Image (spheres, helix red, strand yellow):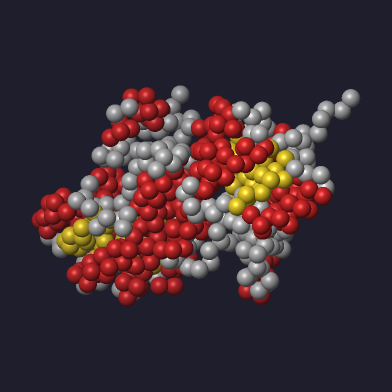
């Protein structure tokens, strides 16, 4: 098979969480462009409907899943319904994530719970719920969106993302028998709504760019293209690992 | 003239959670031996009677507290009680943990999120004003080799979260002189691991998994915890110290 064909995702059926905006939206569109049908899950149904139209314009099927990932009980039924609508499932992208206002502390235990539920709990339970569908398809891929914040250690948000990197390793062992690969990406700063607070703070932004070899933030498409690779047969021997896509985040990056 | 022994903890005020058995109990013993004054916590205070009696017989000052760390109010209350009893705090050891080998269920996830992560964070947060008053403040979190191994259950991922948090907090609090470190034990023979540490599927594979080819003993964690709490470790912060017999396998 020509090498570029191994990057195709023709007729794969994908489920993408947090798809209404930012990285998730870019991932959903990239997967469709690569040939996949996509179930798009998020809270904002209006945005999902608009995205579904864009996916259909690319010639693929879209399935809209209004879903609050903090509601952990609702994840399994949503994945089952999407698999039913698409006729199966080959790919799960656990992208949904929320920032955390309180940094290293806990001001409101419910806020802490919600952040961990979306960033870590939802990944655990969505992976568990997707497993039988991916196995029934003869194997599949789970791509988790972690964060360089987890690798570096940056408060409770980073902690939740380091949890994602660890569960990626664990699930890769557990799911290998079903020919399911489990991989993670650790993006650096990406130009999204979620990163707007950081971009609005010149001091924080300068420090960040100072510690990034490329001295810029990423476009969501630069994360999405890595997801296409990891989801595709081109990455058939990649599992359990976390790949940093961070423009060269390094304490000594720029002096 | 010989300088004071930097490994001693004389007069240091230490709070240790999960102190009724296993690693927590061993840490309590080693701190008492080093001269520390202790506030010990466990879910049920009476479970601490035995260790408290034993340590008091050897002249240690020991206060005991019952704290159910699943309760969001309990960690802060515990810190305040402990600091009041000891007149401050120098050492906080977040040792209590839920091993939860009951698979991936919503209940297990929530319990472990609360006991293994939320409670340590709340304890650290409540302890900060006391640590700022201390001459040698240190926070020691007990993580796990599971943080690196990961897992399809919440335990490993939540330990990874605790390790990441430890590193970040060390950076955040370094300017205040508060050290924040973690210990990542391997498989230590305790009640928590009793279900498998003597099973053939585990012991038969020990030599290829662990360089030293054996399970660890609680004293082997306690010794490191004592070192990390002492002035001998005054330049160590943001470190997650593996104490695991060497998970250095080739494969």
Q: In this view, does B118 lie above or below A80?
A: above
Can residue B57 be seen by looking at this rendering?
yes
Count of marks overlaid on the render: 0
Can residue A54 be seen by looking at this rendering?
no
Between residue B25 and residue A125, name the one nearer to us: B25
Q: Could you tell me residue A231's position as x and y percent? A: 32, 59
Quarter residue A149 falls in = top left
The residue under the point 38% across, 48% down is: A110
The residue under the point 75% across, 47% down is: B30
Q: In this view, does B251 lie above or below A253?
A: below
Q: In this view, does A241 lie above or below B164?
A: below
In screen coordinates, is A45 left or right of B112? left
Quadrant for the N terminus of chain A in the image: bottom left
Q: Could you tell me residue B18's position as x and y percent? A: 62, 53
The residue under the point 14% across, 51% down is: A46
In screen coordinates, is B35 left or right of B159? right
Q: Is residue A24 above or below residue A90?
A: above
Q: Could you tell me residue A248's position as x and y percent? A: 41, 37
The residue under the point 35% across, 52% down is: A118
Q: Which residue lies furthest to the right in this view?
A: B1
In screen coordinates, is B53 left or right of A29? right
Q: Could you tell me residue B189's position as x and y percent? A: 69, 63
Quarter residue B173 falls in = top right
Between residue A87 and residue B14, name the one nearer to us: B14
């Amino acid at each position: 098979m020509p090498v570029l064909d191994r990057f195709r995702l023709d007729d794969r059926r994908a489920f993408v969480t947090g798809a209404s905006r930012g990285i998730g939206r870019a991932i959903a569109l990239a997967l469709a462009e690569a040939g996949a049908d996509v179930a798009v899950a998020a809270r904002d149904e209006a945005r999902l409907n608009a995205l579904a139209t864009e996916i259909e314009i690319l010639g693929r099927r879209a399935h809209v899943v209004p879903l609050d990932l903090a509601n952990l009980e609702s994840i399994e039924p949503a994945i089952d319904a999407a698999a039913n609508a698409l006729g199966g499932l080959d790919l799960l992208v656990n992208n949904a994530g929320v920032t955390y206002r309180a940094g290293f502390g806990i001001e409101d235990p419910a806020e802490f719970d919600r952040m961990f539920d979306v960033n870590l709990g939802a990944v655990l339970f969505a992976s568990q719920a997707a497993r039988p569908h991916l196995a029934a398809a003869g194997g599949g891929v789970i791509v988790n969106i972690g964060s360089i914040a987890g690798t570096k250690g940056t408060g409770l948000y980073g902690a939740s993302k380091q949890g994602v990197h660890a569960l990626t390793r664990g699930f890769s062992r557990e799911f290998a028998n079903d020919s399911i690969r489990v991989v993670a990406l650790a993006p650096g700063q990406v130009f999204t709504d979620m990163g707007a607070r950081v971009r609005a703070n010149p001091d924080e932004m300068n420090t960040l760019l100072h510690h990034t070899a490329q001295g810029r933030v990423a476009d969501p498409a630069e994360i999405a293209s890595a997801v296409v690779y990891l989801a595709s047969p081109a990455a058939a021997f990649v599992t359990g690992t976390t790949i940093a896509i961070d423009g060269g985040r390094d304490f000594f990056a720029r002096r | 003239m010989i300088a004071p022994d930097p490994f001693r903890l004389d007069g240091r005020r230490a709070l240790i959670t999960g102190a009724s058995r296993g690693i927590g109990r061993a840490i309590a013993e080693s701190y008492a031996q080093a001269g520390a004054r202790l506030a010990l916590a466990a879910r049920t205070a009476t479970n601490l009677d035995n260790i408290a009696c034993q340590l008091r017989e050897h002249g240690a000052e020991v206060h005991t507290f019952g704290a159910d760390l699943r309760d969001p109010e309990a960690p802060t209350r515990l810190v305040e009680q402990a600091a009041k009893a000891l007149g401050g705090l120098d050492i906080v050891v977040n040792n209590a943990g839920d091993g939860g080998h009951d698979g991936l269920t919503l209940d297990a996830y929530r319990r472990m999120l609360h006991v293994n992560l939320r409670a340590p964070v709340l304890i650290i947060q409540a302890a900060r004003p006391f640590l700022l008053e201390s001459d040698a403040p240190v926070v020691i979190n007990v993580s796990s080799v599971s943080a690196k191994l990961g897992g399809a259950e919440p335990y490993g991922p939540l330990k990874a979260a605790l390790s990441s948090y430890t590193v970040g907090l060390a950076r955040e609090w370094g300017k205040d002189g508060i050290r924040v470190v973690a210990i990542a034990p391997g498989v230590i023979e305790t009640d928590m691991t009793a279900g498998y540490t003597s099973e053939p599927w585990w012991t038969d594979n020990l030599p290829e998994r662990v360089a030293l080819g054996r399970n660890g003993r609680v004293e082997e964690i306690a010794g490191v915890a004592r070192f990390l709490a002492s002035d001998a470790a005054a330049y160590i912060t943001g470190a997650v110290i593996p104490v695991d017999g060497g998970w250095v396998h080739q494969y």
